[in-house]
Image (cartoon, rainbow, N blue to C red):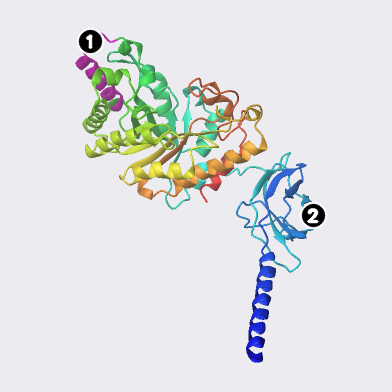
């Protein structure tokens, strides 16, 4: 009996000892700290802050220029801190940094990493932007593509800053507006080729690809056609004649055309244009058929035909409607590629949305043209404090988004690459700050060059996207 009692007592002692050890071990599992936004931001530092963690007398602070913490600021790789903040010093101005923290107990038990905080120091980093010419780097790729820019005829005078930059940096041009229907067609069968010819001749004489933009667009209908009093069938014949004459005039000189531009509304319906009203629901297919027939008749067998539209990446209704049109053109063997305008912002669309949109065209074997690229930093839904100046935060965010879109494009299969075209040269001449369609609230800085033709971080981001 005595032995049984001793056995029971021994078992209880072991049980309670085990529970005590489990409680002790449980106490050593530290909560994950929460990092707070930086304070006291200056040209060369900031104060990192975080919340208290029970049983943690010290914390380990990491500071990096990479959100993945693939490198560390000197002395900030698990720096031991016995407070809830630390003044980080010795940094560069106008530079993006990231910090995170872990809690640590006296028993050297370490918590999980906190959330990551991004902070940009004030001032400028005084690091010159990468001066490498865009087309030079692109042409060294295993699978190069055209690097394009939208131009105006008055920018193309020999020796102008535009001319110098175009010849150095770009291998393709698109007319920003001057090759549209209302600029060329003055009456039925009557054309003013002067300005459009200047753009095409500039490209041809300088070994620069010319992309034609655009044969049919609802916002460039000449007055005589908008007021056309003939029958709908006669109206369609006028459009056919225009497409035929333009394609024929530029045979062998213009490598590609946006045949129809922006045929779809945001709600996924066909845009209610004069072409839809007078030519019917099949008008897009008809325009492509006429463009293809004109190219064949002119023995321009290399001409590429594109459908071009905007905002399809983050609007699935519009995207699906556009691909319904594209599917019909593919079935009829009338289309060679798709133009994705990409008038993007630093907020939207996301990388995943862009890739999903473009990959639908890749899967159909079509060529991809990022046709009108710019990057708003001050879109209509931005906070009011973003409207006044081009801050370091906006500069670096824009740089990353340019890098992202170029990286997406560069990863495409070689057979699907055509061109990546930036919609203009200088910030102060972009269409965006003056756009009533965008309800734009103020200034913006969406391009690769500033108002003085200076390289921006966006240009460096473009180059980095090619790595």
Q: Residue at x 66, y 61 (%)?
A: 111
Find residue 136 and name its label.
none
- Residue 372 vs 13, above or below: the answer is above
**Quadrant in the rendering for residue 278:** top left
Q: Quick one: SS at disc 1?
A: loop
Q: Position of residue 6 (x, y in %)?
A: 67, 87
Labels 2 and 1: the sequence-earlier one: 2
State whether the magenta stretch is mostly helix, strand or loop. helix
Please name whichever residue, 414 or 72, is drawn nearer the observer in this view of the structure: 72
- Residue 188 vs 371, above or below: the answer is above
Please name whichever residue, 87 or 163, is drawn nearer the observer in this view of the structure: 87
Find residue 83 and name its label.
2
Please name whichever residue, 367 or 375, is drawn nearer the observer in this view of the structure: 375
Magenta-span inclusion, residue 438:
no
Q: Is residue 257 visible?
A: yes
Q: Which residue is mark 1?
A: 230
Please name whichever residue, 71 or 267, is drawn nearer the observer in this view of the structure: 267
**Quadrant in the rendering for residue 346:** top right
Q: Position of residue 358 (x, y in %)?
A: 39, 42
Q: Residue at x 66, y 26 (%)?
A: 388
Residue stretch in magenta: 228-247
Q: Position of residue 392 (x, y in %)?
A: 67, 38
Q: Quick one: SS at disc 2?
A: loop
Is 452 placed left or right of 319 in the picture?
Answer: right
Q: CA distance from mark 2 to mark 1?
A: 83 Å
Is 177 placed left or right of 137 in the picture?
Answer: left
Mark 2 residue crowding within 10 angstroms, few (<14) / some (14–19) / many (20+): few
Is 41 placed left or right of 426 in the picture?
Answer: right
Q: Position of residue 288 (x, y in %)?
A: 26, 30
Is 243 placed left or right of 76 in the picture?
Answer: left
- Residue 405 vs 426, above or below: the answer is below
Q: Residue at x 62, y 57 (%)?
A: 70
């Amino acid at each position: 009996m005595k032995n049984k009692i001793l056995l029971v007592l021994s078992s209880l002692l072991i049980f309670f000892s085990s529970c005590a050890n489990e409680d002790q071990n449980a106490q050593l599992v530290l909560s994950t700290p929460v990092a707070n936004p930086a304070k006291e931001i200056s040209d060369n530092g900031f104060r990192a802050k975080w919340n208290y963690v029970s049983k943690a007398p010290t914390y380990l602070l990491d500071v990096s220029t990479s959100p993945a913490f693939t490198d560390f600021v000197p002395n900030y790789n698990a720096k031991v801190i016995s407070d809830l903040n630390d003044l980080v010093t010795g940094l560069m101005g106008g530079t993006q940094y990231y910090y995170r923290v872990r809690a640590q107990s006296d028993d050297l038990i370490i918590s999980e990493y906190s959330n990551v905080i991004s902070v940009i120091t004030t001032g400028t980093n005084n690091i010159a932007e990468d001066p490498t010419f865009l087309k030079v780097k692109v042409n060294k790729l295993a699978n190069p593509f055209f690097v394009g820019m939208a131009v105006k005829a008055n920018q193309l005078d020999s020796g102008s800053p535009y001319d110098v930059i175009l010849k150095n940096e770009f291998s393709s041009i698109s007319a920003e507006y001057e090759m549209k229907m209302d600029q060329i067609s003055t009456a039925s069968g009557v054309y003013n080729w002067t300005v459009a010819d200047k753009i095409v001749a500039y490209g041809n004489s300088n070994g620069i690809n010319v992309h034609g933009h655009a044969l049919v667009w609802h916002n460039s209908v000449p007055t005589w056609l908008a007021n056309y009093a003939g029958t709908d069938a006669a109206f369609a014949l006028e459009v056919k004649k225009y497409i035929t004459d333009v394609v024929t005039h530029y045979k062998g000189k213009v490598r590609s055309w946006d045949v129809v531009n922006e045929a779809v509304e945001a709600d996924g319906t066909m845009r209610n244009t004069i072409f839809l009203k007078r030519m019917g629901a099949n008008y897009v297919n008809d325009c492509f058929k006429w463009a293809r027939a004109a190219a064949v008749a002119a023995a321009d067998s290399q001409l590429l035909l594109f459908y071009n539209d905007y905002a399809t990446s983050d609007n699935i209704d519009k995207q699906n409607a556009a691909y319904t049109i594209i599917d019909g053109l593919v079935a009829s063997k009338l289309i060679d590629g798709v133009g994705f305008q990409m008038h993007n912002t630093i907020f939207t669309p996301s990388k995943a949305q862009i890739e999903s949109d473009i990959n639908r065209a890749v899967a159909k074997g079509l060529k991809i043209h990022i046709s009108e690229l710019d990057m708003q930093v001050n879109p209509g839904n931005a906070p009011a404090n973003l409207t006044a100046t081009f801050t370091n935060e906006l500069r670096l965010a824009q740089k990353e988004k340019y890098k992202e879109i170029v990286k997406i494009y560069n990863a495409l299969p070689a057979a699907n690459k055509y061109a990546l075209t930036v919609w203009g040269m200088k910030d102060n001449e972009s269409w965006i700050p003056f756009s009533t369609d965008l309800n734009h609230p103020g200034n913006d800085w969406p391009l690769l060059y500033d108002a003085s033709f200076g390289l921006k971080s966006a240009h460096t981001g473009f180059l980095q996207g090619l790595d």
